[in-house]
Image (tube, coloured by chain):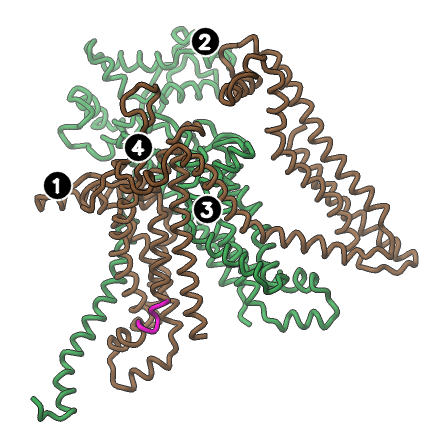
């Protein structure tokens, strides 16, 4: 019996419980009893009692089984390994898991008892796990069947359960935030045990290579993240210098000048740019924009890197245009018509109205929009991972190759990882910085935009 | 200057003001045109590079399926056929036909794809009675030949192929034996290190499984959260905190969701890496804010009169919400969900963190099989050194964009069709 058939069985039980409860309630009603709730409520109550505990048990069990099985396994390992360090135990455990799946190459006789124990455990685990879920489901069915009588306040109970479920769903967003924060904080803490915080934040050399042997030269690796921060800022700056003027002017044109027909087609067409996956932009940057930038630079006698910050920044700017334009469009449209009318009444031209009345009035909203766009530029990954380099140069020259925080996170975490090397942990420290910076930007921007909206509502 | 009337002053300045007005307008037009131009360039660039990925160069060959050489006869069973040396048969055929000098043989064989022998094997597996007969087949050619035939034919030199090879190829091409067929392998194969055999079926299946997990989790949870926040939540600090959280999460960089997936789902809960399950979990957390925000907007758009009418008839709060508000808000919620799904479909960065970047040849069958997704496949191929991979990257992008356009068009259609104005 596998998971899918178990899930199907639970779904069938769930549906069956509903029908059973409903029909029983109907039978009770026709027998002359006066029901507290509608028959469907009795059905729903029985279904919830049957399905919910079983699904909860399955979820909890899947989360907890790994650590529990490992804890039981450790006792079966040879004594020599049990005395060893955590890493040795982990290694032995993963060997045992591989052997149990028949994937281990060198059969280690001393591990054999543990392997057999694991196979037996897995067998027992499966039986207990699935059997437990079924038993709980049937138990719920039986219990709710016994409780079912006309005076049962089925509707009240169902509604209470459903509102708890609804509340839990909305709590998941909060859990996600805490999950992100906890995971990056935990790993970043481990990183800062090995590398000084100040060295990380203010050091100017980034070469996260950790030597394999202790005596190798330059074995410590250096984790000064300043070149990453400047690289991120440089690329974001290039992107914003494209996106802000173009996006803002597009928004002004589309909301103040364009005829309704032009607006109807041009606005969604511009927003298509926002829907294109970033990996496509990255490919476009590598394939077309970077060679073009290089050719133009070389023809002007400049020395351009083939992974220049300019190419990545340009393409990122194009990606962000619709972001700036649609947010600015919203805030410009929120400026009351009376302000425009007042300005026209004093004899101002359209552009004067825009520059001297609308933009000052919409400024907080526009600032908020730009901040959100900056946060997007800082966190953008694929374009820079494909078009910007890996070389951590500390430079302000847009023709040079720079690297960014997100590129380094990807590079450090793709491939095999061990969770005790500073190299892997450094990615989480960078993630922490990234998360905090974007969170702050978003938070302030959302507040500013909200305040601004309230002002004109 | 001082004795000018106001009227004169204004008239003098009018020219300057009008010029500035038309300049400003021109900037606006230029900005919109620039944005649209970028869009057009992007699409034409991808199309120009990618359309040829849907065609594959093949060569018409009459080849004798020599039973003696293969060591099988027309009654052979599948296992014997699978062991037979079709590769050698193809090589022998070309050796006899072209009769190259000894030192050129390797170069001749390198023109034919490794897939050619599988083509013959597949034919024989389907119909063992072909053994001993001479069959006409369109054999798959190597990616270098493919690129040459599609893009460099007529050029005298080629970066990879040498003169001898070009001589053979030009002869075959002049005889009309080389031609292009629709590239079915691109849609039926998984990934491969040989460009001419690499296809997107594995990636598309992986994408489908991942999105299925995402949809099954994010749609119910997103709608439930939206209902709670709009209809049930008391206006207090906690609700406000939840709302701020959701709005912030919508703007947090997607890569941080990858970090969360790696640290919590994989390291803490022990979910298997590289699987659609863990990918779907991460994408669920990422798309939830989008779905919640648009679902709330949809619920808000249902006029209070509907609720009041239902209350007036004696419905409970739950009945009002589930029997009246929800059905009316559902089209808007679905639109938001489709847009969220489209976002998830194009997402790459967080999936790199959780190992969906692995080189997976097999087509995944279930949500716990290792797999990759279309955008990650595009990323992987874009790093390929062969020119043929560049073409395939663009081809895969075209397929991805087609999916996205379909989804967004569905959302727009749904909105037009089902949305009611009150």
Q: Nearer the viewer, residue B36 or A82?
A: A82
Q: Which chain does brown denote in the image? A: A
Q: Are marks 4 and 2 in contact (CB under 8 Å)?
A: no
Q: Is residue A33 left or right of residue B236?
A: right
**What residue is shown at x 65% (from left), y 37% (from top)?**
A60
- Report whether residue B366 is seen: no
Can you give x and y, in whole percent of width and height, for residue A127 in the image?
70, 26
Q: Are marks 3 and 4 in contact (CB under 8 Å)?
A: no
Can you give x and y, in whole percent of width and height, for residue A301 in the image?
8, 44
The magenta stretch spans which residues?
A: A359-364
Distance from disc 2 to disc 1, alpha carbons, whole Å, reads: 64 Å
Distance from disc 1 to disc 4, alpha carbons, whole Å, reads: 29 Å
Q: Which quadrant holds residue A365?
A: bottom left
Provide the residue designation for mark 4. A222
Q: Is residue A320 above or below residue B392?
A: below
Distance from disc 1 to disc 3, alpha carbons, whole Å, reads: 39 Å
**What residue is shown at x 45% (from left), y 29% (from top)?**
A419
Can you give x and y, in whole percent of width and height, for residue A296 in the image?
13, 46
Distance from disc 4 to disc 2, alpha carbons, whole Å, reads: 63 Å
SS of the residue under disc 3: helix
Provide the residue designation for mark 1. A303
* Dot 1 and dot 4 within a common chain: yes
Crowding near the residue tagged with mark 1, few <14, some 14–19, many ≥20 C-alpha atoms within 10 Å = few
Provide the residue designation for mark 3. B344
Q: Which quadrant holds residue A447?
A: bottom left
Distance from disc 3 to disc 2, alpha carbons, whole Å, reads: 50 Å
Q: Nearer the viewer, mark 1 or mark 3?
A: 1
SS of the residue under disc 1: loop
Q: Mark 1 belongs to which subunit?
A: A
Provide the residue designation for mark 2. B72
């Amino acid at each position: 019996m596998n998971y899918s058939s178990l899930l199907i069985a639970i779904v069938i039980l769930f549906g069956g419980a509903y029908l059973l409860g409903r029909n029983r309630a109907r039978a009770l009603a026709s027998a002359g009893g006066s029901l507290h709730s509608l028959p469907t409520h009795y059905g729903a109550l029985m279904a919830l009692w049957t399905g919910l505990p079983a699904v909860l048990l399955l979820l909890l069990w899947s989360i907890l089984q790994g650590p529990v099985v490992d804890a039981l396994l450790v006792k079966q390992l040879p004594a020599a390994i049990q005395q060893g360090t955590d890493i040795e135990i982990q290694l032995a455990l993963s060997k045992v898991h591989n052997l149990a799946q028949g994937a281990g190459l060198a059969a280690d006789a001393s591990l054999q008892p543990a392997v057999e124990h694991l196979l037996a455990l897995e067998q027992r685990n499966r039986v207990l796990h699935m059997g437990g879920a079924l038993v709980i489901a049937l138990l719920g069915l039986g219990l709710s069947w016994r409780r079912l009588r006309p005076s049962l306040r089925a509707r009240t109970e169902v509604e209470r359960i459903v509102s708890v479920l609804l509340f839990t769903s909305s709590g998941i967003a909060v859990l996600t935030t805490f999950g992100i924060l906890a995971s990056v904080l935990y790993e970043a803490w481990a990183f800062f045990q090995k590398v000084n915080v100040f060295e990380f934040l203010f050091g100017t050399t980034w070469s996260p290579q950790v030597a394999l042997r202790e005596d190798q030269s330059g074995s410590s690796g250096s984790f000064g993240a300043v070149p990453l921060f400047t690289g991120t800022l440089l690329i974001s700056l290039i992107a914003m210098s494209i996106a802000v003027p173009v996006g803002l002017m597009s928004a002004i044109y589309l909301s103040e000048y364009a005829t309704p027909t032009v607006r109807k087609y041009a606005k969604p067409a511009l927003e298509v740019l926002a829907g294109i996956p970033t990996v496509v932009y990255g490919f476009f940057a590598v394939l077309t924009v970077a060679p073009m930038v290089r050719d133009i630079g070389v023809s002007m006698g400049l020395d351009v890197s083939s992974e220049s910050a300019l190419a990545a920044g340009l393409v990122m700017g194009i990606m962000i245009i619709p972001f700036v334009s649609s947010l600015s469009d919203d805030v410009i449209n929120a400026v009351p018509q009376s302000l425009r009318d007042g300005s026209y009444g004093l004899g101002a031209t359209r552009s004067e109205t825009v520059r001297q009345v609308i933009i000052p009035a919409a400024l907080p909203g526009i600032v908020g929009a730009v901040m959100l766009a900056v946060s997007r530029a800082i966190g953008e990954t694929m374009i820079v991972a494909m078009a910007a380099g890996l070389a951590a140069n500390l430079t302000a020259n847009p023709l040079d190759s720079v690297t960014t925080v997100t590129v380094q996170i990807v590079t450090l975490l793709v491939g095999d990882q061990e969770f005790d090397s500073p190299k892997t942990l450094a990615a989480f420290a960078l993630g922490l910085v990234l998360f905090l910076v974007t969170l702050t930007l978003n938070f302030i921007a959302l507040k500013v935009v909200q305040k601004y909206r309230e002002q004109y509502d | 200057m001082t004795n000018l009337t106001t009227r004169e002053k204004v008239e003098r300045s009018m020219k300057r003001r009008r010029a500035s007005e038309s300049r400003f307008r021109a900037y606006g037009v230029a900005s919109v045109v620039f944005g649209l131009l970028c869009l057009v360039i992007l699409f034409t660039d991808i199309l120009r590079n990618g359309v040829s990925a849907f065609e594959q160069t093949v060569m018409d060959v009459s080849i004798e399926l020599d039973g003696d050489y293969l060591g099988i006869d027309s009654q052979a069973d599948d296992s014997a056929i699978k062991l037979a040396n079709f590769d050698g048969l193809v090589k022998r055929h070309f050796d006899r036909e072209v009769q190259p000098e000894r030192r050129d043989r390797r170069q001749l064989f390198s023109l034919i794809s490794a897939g050619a022998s599988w083509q013959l094997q597949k034919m024989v597996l389907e119909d063992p009675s072909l053994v001993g007969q001479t069959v006409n087949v369109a054999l798959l050619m190597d990616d270098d030949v493919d690129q040459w035939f599609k893009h460099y034919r007529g050029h005298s030199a080629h970066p990879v192929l040498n003169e001898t090879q070009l001589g053979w190829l030009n002869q075959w091409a002049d005889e009309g034996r080389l031609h292009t067929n629709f590239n079915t392998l691109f849609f039926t194969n998984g990934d491969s290190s040989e460009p001419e055999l690499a296809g997107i079926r594995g990636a598309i299946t992986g994408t489908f499984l991942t999105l299925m997990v995402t949809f099954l989790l994010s749609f119910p949870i997103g709608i439930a959260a939206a209902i709670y926040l709009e209809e049930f939540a008391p206006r207090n600090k906690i609700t406000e905190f939840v709302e701020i959280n959701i709005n912030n999460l919508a703007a947090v960089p997607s890569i941080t969701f990858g970090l969360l997936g790696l640290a919590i789902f994989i390291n803490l809960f022990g979910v298997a890496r590289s699987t659609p399950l863990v990918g779907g979990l991460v994408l669920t957390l990422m798309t939830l804010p989008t779905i919640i925000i648009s679902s709330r907007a949809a619920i808000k758009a249902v006029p209070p009169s509907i609720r009041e009418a239902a209350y007036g008839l004696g419905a409970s709060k739950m009945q009002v919400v589930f029997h009246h508000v929800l059905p009316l808000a559902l089209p808007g919620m679905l639109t938001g969900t489709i847009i969220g799904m489209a976002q998830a479909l194009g997402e790459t960065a967080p999936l790199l963190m959780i190992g969906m970047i692995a080189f997976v040849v097999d087509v995944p069958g279930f949500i716990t099989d290792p797999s990759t997704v279309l955008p990650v496949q595009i990323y992987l191929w874009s790093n390929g050194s062969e020119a043929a991979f560049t073409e395939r990257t663009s081809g895969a992008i075209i397929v991805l964009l087609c999916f996205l356009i379909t989804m967004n068009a569905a959302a727009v259609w749904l909105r037009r069709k089902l949305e009611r104005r009150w």
